[in-house]
Image (cartoon, coloured by chain):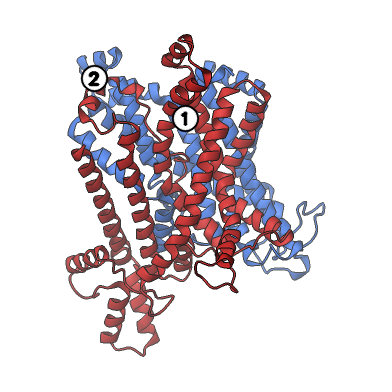
Chain colours: A blue, B red
């Protein structure tokens, strides 16, 4: 494990983009945890006098139509975004890895049957399905939203992990584990899992990116209930108040979009660095 | 070969069947489901007798609310396979099939064109990045391309509307064609359609081609390192021949599969882009239906999106043996099962995104 971090640090030091990515992700995580205690938004009566203020010391990004500081809203909105994104990625990765390893290792009828199910989930377009389910169930809780967001995403990972498990199955150490009569749980968890670990880690990061994209999209479109403060809700409200046509409210639209882009780009850059830690072949360049 | 075709067709039909069943389940059986919602709404209006309410429900969803559930299910599936998805609540009197039928060509036109452009652009740039791996060009392009692939398409759509359409006024910000041209095969209409499609297509391409370029780069780099390429080089073949027949063709193979698999993702993205550009495609109507709680139109859009993706996948699957004859021969497949590692599993580009 320490070797992993040493490798990661070495690559980050040489690759400024990766270092930037890691720093940004860390900063967002910190904001998600402590954000609510360092910045406050009023939930009381909207104050017309403080609406659409220009940037100032108290409100570095100005205020929105309700007189709330935009920067404060961004900070408070970090937690729901990160929370749902990470939860959804955890669900996606867990199901994908378990299904992939078990079907790949056990094979036979189980494998054939489960893979047909995976094929179906790979074919159904994910985002429209998510939109339909969210709009019918009116799901609003973080766990429910996260579960819906991962409804089709696990299938791609399951298939990729399965093909790796297939090739691991015939290797000596797995065969000797089988001959020793180790239980399935041990073979899956102790023998196979560590060998697909790096691949899973990268896909976990990608799953977070994908979930955040879809999750914010749901709020932006107004499909998910618009309660609470998060960047998607902010964009939705700014758009519906005509931020495109009223210059003074432009910041309330651009700020959350910038927050999203910064986070997504950071994830992509950092994932690339992870990739080159795990795949020495890519390191040559 | 015949077995291969049969299997693909059966899988496609099964997926469509599952999606239709799923939509029945969602509309009819979910707690607080759509049918109950409409019934309550009509009862609250108070001006209808229970029989009239039943008839209205039957007209909208094509099933009678008080018959046994299994019977409702059979009716729903039967109707759906015959192309009857009920009528829209949002647009009274119009059948869902009529609405989505009019919307589909716009989506296929814009999404299809955008997908082809991003694929071509991505493959081209990706190959260049692989060939000039250590150049400054490759490093800068990799950064730019990774950046673009990370930006959500709704953000790009909003920015394009603001800067290109509103501020600069270069292209119209919405609609599929302008109101003062008559639809038909005349130059004014075709010109208007093209001008209106520019920004939506640009929004797709900007956010999609990066993933293609990076995937192609990876595929091409690993092909360049393969031994048959080195042996071709040592046989003194022309470098152009090597690039085209040895590297190009072999690294394109997984890309073609990814093209098919990414269709679902692109159709999903059309939801955002069409909504913001008010482009009257399927994604636009899906969101309209969601906002208005028009569940029959919503399920119609969803079923049609899925069917389009299934059909597109099927077409690619049927053409794939022409590109790679190994695919359709189960015998060779079985023989290779042990050596499966070298067959790289095709993964849809952008697959991490739902």
Q: Which mark is residue A201?
A: 1
- Which one is nearer the viewer's eye here, B239 or B155? B239
- Crowding near the residue tagged with mark 2, few <14, some 14–19, many ≥20 C-alpha atoms within 10 Å: few
- Which one is nearer the viewer's eye here, A131 or B142? B142
Vertical relation: A5 (above or below) A90 = above
Q: Chain of mark 1?
A: A
Q: Separation of disc 2 and disc 1 at Cα? A: 26 Å
Residue A185 in the figure: left or right of residue A149: left
Chain-order first, disc 2 or disc 1: 2
**Picture quarter containing residue B72?**
bottom left
| Nearer mark to the viewer, of 2 and 1 | 1
Q: Which mark is residue B333?
A: none
> Mark 1 and mark 2 in contact (Cβ < 8 Å)?
no
Vertical relation: B78 (above or below) A96 = below
- Quarter in which the N terminus of chain B is drawn: top left
Is residue B225 at all visible to an observer of this figure? yes
Q: Which mark is residue A182?
A: 2
Residue depicted at x 44% and y 64%: B103
SS at badge 1: helix
Asked whether the residues under marks 2 and 1 belong to the same chain, the reply is yes
Q: Position of residue B22 (x, y in %)?
A: 29, 57
Residue depicted at x 63% and y 27%: B138
Is residue A273 at all visible to an observer of this figure? no
- Crowding near the residue tagged with mark 1, few <14, some 14–19, many ≥20 C-alpha atoms within 10 Å: some
Residue depicted at x 35% and y 43%: B316
């Amino acid at each position: 494990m320490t070797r992993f971090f040493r490798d990661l640090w070495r690559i980050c030091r040489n690759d400024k983009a990766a270092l930037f990515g890691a720093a940004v992700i860390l900063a967002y995580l910190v904001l998600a945890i402590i954000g609510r205690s360092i910045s406050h938004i009023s939930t009381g009566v909207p104050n017309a006098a403080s609406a659409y203020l220009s940037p100032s010391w108290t409100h570095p990004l100005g205020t929105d139509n309700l007189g709330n500081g935009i920067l404060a809203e961004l900070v408070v909105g970090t937690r729901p975004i990160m929370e749902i994104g990470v939860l959804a990625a955890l669900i996606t990765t867990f199901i994908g890895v378990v299904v992939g390893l078990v079907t790949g290792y056990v094979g036979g009828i189980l494998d054939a049957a489960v893979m047909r199910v995976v094929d179906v989930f790979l074919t159904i377009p994910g985002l429209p399905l998510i939109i339909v389910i969210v709009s019918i169930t009116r799901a609003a809780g973080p766990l429910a939203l996260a579960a819906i967001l991962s409804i089709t995403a696990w299938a791609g990972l399951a298939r990729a992990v399965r093909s790796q498990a297939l090739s691991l199955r015939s290797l000596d150490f797995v065969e000797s584990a089988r001959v020793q009569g180790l239980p399935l749980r041990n073979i899956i968890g102790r023998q196979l899992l560590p060998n697909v670990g790096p691949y899973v880690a990268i896909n976990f990061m990608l799953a977070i990116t994908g979930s955040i994209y879809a999750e914010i999209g749901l709020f932006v479109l107004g499909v998910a209930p618009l309660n609470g403060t998060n960047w998607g809700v902010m964009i939705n409200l700014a758009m519906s108040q005509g931020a495109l046509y009223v210059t003074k409210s432009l910041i309330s639209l651009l700020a959350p979009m910038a927050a999203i882009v910064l986070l997504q780009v950071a994830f992509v850059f950092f994932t690339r660095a992870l990739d080159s830690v795990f795949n020495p072949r890519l390191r040559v360049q | 070969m015949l077995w291969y075709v049969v299997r693909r067709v059966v899988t496609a039909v099964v997926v469509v069947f599952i999606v239709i069943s799923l939509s029945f389940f969602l509309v009819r059986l979910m707690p607080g489901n759509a049918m109950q919602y409409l019934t309550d709404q009509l009862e609250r209006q108070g001006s209808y007798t229970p029989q009239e309410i039943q008839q209205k429900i039957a007209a909208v969803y094509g099933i009678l609310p008080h018959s046994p559930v299994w019977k409702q299910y059979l009716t729903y599936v039967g109707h759906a396979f015959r192309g009857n998805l009920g009528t829209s609540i949002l647009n009274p009197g119009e059948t869902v099939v009529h609405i989505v039928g009019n919307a589909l060509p716009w989506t296929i036109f814009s999404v299809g064109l955008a997908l082809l452009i991003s694929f071509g652009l991505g493959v081209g740039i990706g190959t260049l990045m692989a060939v000039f791996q250590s150049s400054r060009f490759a490093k800068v392009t990799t950064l730019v391309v990774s950046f673009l692939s990370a930006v959500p398409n709704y953000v790009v759509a909003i920015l394009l509307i603001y800067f290109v359409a509103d501020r600069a006024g270069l292209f119209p910000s919405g609609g599929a064609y302008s109101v003062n041209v008559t639809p038909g095969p005349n130059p004014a209409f075709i010109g208007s359609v093209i001008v209106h499609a520019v920004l939506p297509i640009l929004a797709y391409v900007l956010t999609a081609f990066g993933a293609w370029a990076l995937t192609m780069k990876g595929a091409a780099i690993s092909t360049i390192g393969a031994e048959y390429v080195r042996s071709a080089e040592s046989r003194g073949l022309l470098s152009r021949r090597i690039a085209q027949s040895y590297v190009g063709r072999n690294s394109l193979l997984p890309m073609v599969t990814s093209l098919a698999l990414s269709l679902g993702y692109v159709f999903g993205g059309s939801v955002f882009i069409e909504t913001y550009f008010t482009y009257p495609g399927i994604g636009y109507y899906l969101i309209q239906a969601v906002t208005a709680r028009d569940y029959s139109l919503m399920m119609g859009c969803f079923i049609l999106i899925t069917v389009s993706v299934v059909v597109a996948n099927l077409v690619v699957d049927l053409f794939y043996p022409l590109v790679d004859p190994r695919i359709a021969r189960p015998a060779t497949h079985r023989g290779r099962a042990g050596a499966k590692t070298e067959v790289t599993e095709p993964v849809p580009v952008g697959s991490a995104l739902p």
